[in-house]
């Protein structure tokens, strides 16, 4: 006698786990992108601040 697997439950589980994995990957990708963007913004702000301070100290503004 062969036991039949519940095909509906198996299909739903496969879809559900696939969606969870996909959402996790998208979340990590989004966090990584935001972190990279924040680093670039911080560098730009530091550079502008340094140039403005030099301008004020030298009195060339």
Image (cartoon, rainbow, N blue to C red):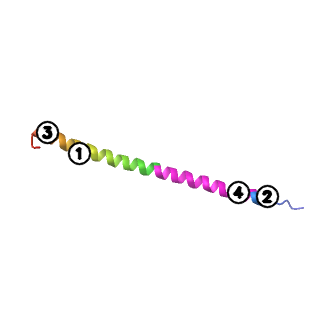
Residue 18 location (% of width, % of height): 62, 56
Mark earlier in primary sequence (1, 4): 4
Task: Say which quadrant the C terminus sits in.
Answer: top left
Residue at the (86%, 62%) spot, across then down: 2
Q: How busy is the neighbourhood of tag 3: few (under 14 within 10 Å), some, or many (20 plus)? A: few
Residue that label 2 marks: 6
Residue that label 1 marks: 48
Q: Cα distance, mark 1 to mark 4?
A: 54 Å
Residue at the (57%, 55%) spot, across then down: 22
Which of 52/39 is in front?
52
Q: Cα distance, mark 3 to mark 1?
A: 12 Å
Residue 23 disc label = none
Q: Cα distance, mark 3 to mark 2?
A: 75 Å
Q: Is residue 3 left or right of residue 9?
A: right
Q: Cα distance, mark 1 to mark 2?
A: 63 Å
Q: Nearer the viewer, mark 3 or mark 2?
A: 3
Mark earlier in primary sequence (3, 4): 4
Q: Is residue 23 left or right of residue 57?
A: right
Magenta residues, start to end? 9-30
Residue 47 location (% of width, % of height): 24, 45
Task: Kindly state the secondary structure of the residue where label 4 is placed.
Answer: helix
Task: Kindly state the secondary structure of the residue where label 1 is placed.
Answer: helix
Mark earlier in primary sequence (3, 1): 1
Q: Cα distance, mark 3 to mark 4?
A: 65 Å
Dots 1, 4 in contact, CB < 8 A: no
């Amino acid at each position: 006698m062969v036991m039949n697997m519940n095909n509906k439950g198996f299909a739903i589980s496969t879809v559900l786990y696939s969606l969870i994995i996909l959402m996790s990957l998208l979340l990590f990708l989004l966090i990584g992108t935001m972190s990279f963007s924040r680093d670039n913004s911080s560098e730009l702000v530091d550079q502008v601040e340094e140039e403005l301070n030099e301008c004020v100290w030298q009195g060339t503004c």
